[in-house]
Image (spheres, rainbow, N blue to C red):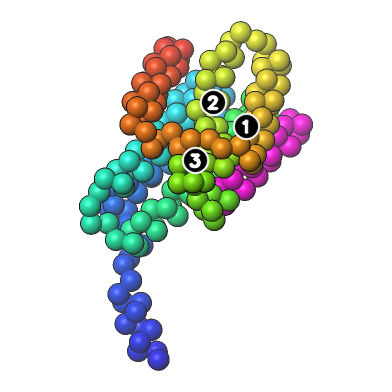
Amino acid sequence: MSSGNTVSQELQPTILSYVKDLPNLCSLAGMVCTLLAIYFCILGVYYAAMIGMIWAVAFDWADGLIARRMKGRTANDQTFGVQLDSLIDIVSYGVTPAILLLSYGKFEPLFLAGAFIILAASAIRLSYFNTFGLSGSSKYTGLAVDSNNIILVFIFLFESFFSAGIFSFILYASVLGLAFLNVSQIKTPKLNGNPVNVYIFAFYTLVITGIYGWKLL
């Protein structure tokens, strides 16, 4: 029995062997963007954080597009990629918005509730999707968590029109609204499954990057 276990363990690929898989590299690149977004949120450099948040989505979309077009990926490659993508998603679309809200709210205790709600909603939404998948093979149940970043970076464009105090509550309300939509029963389309949407999002990413890059100057 022990020799059989030894053989099966020897046949298992090494952990780092999956890093060379191109979709996984895209996922990890997105995690770098997420880390930078969190870093700049904590520093209060929000325009830089917005760039990191939108590029996290861009790399997330890219890994799926590449994975669907690659030939010769094994079942283990696909399973590992799905797990890695999901784990990164909770950081990108749950932890990052939570830290953005906390930071903009000057880490006041009042903002802890909103941070927990968006983080919990993202975790619940991802767990539900990992269990049941798409509804009817084409739609999500609940707002897809990548929409959290897509919408928040747009809302933040209007930050300069309000005082910090007022915008902190606009941000709070936005985060709560997104959390509600994440766990709602609404059906939303799988945006990155349509080539037209991919081009629109690529344009949106470049525009957002340009605007916030200009604001940083």
SS state under label 2: helix
Query: Mark 1 or mark 2: which comes first in sequence?
Result: 2
**Amino acid bearing label 2:** Ile
* Residues at circles 3 and 1 in contact by the CB criterion of under 8 Å: no
Give the residue pinned by disc 3: 139
Using a 10 Å C-alpha cutoff, classify the residue at mark 3 as few (fewer than 14 neighbours), some (14 to 19) or many (20 or more).
some
Q: Main secondary structure of the magenta part?
A: helix
Give the residue pinned by disc 1: 178
Q: Which residues are the magenta region?
A: 108-127
Give the residue pinned by disc 2: 151
**Amino acid bearing label 3:** Lys
Q: Do we see residue 105 in this rendering?
A: no
Using a 10 Å C-alpha cutoff, classify the residue at mark 1 as few (fewer than 14 neighbours), some (14 to 19) or many (20 or more).
many
Residue 177 in the image, given as x and y percentages of width and height: 66, 29
* Residues at circles 1 and 2 in contact by the CB criterion of under 8 Å: yes
Query: Mark 3 or mark 2: which comes first in sequence?
Result: 3
Give me the residue at 54% from left, 56% from top: 131
Instruction: Give the CA distance from mark 3 to mark 1.
Output: 18 Å
Residue 2 in the image, given as x and y percentages of width and height: 39, 89
Query: Mark 3 or mark 1: which comes first in sequence?
Result: 3
Give me the residue at 74% from left, 37% from top: 113
Q: Residue furthest left?
A: 71
Q: Is residue 85 left or right of residue 10?
A: right
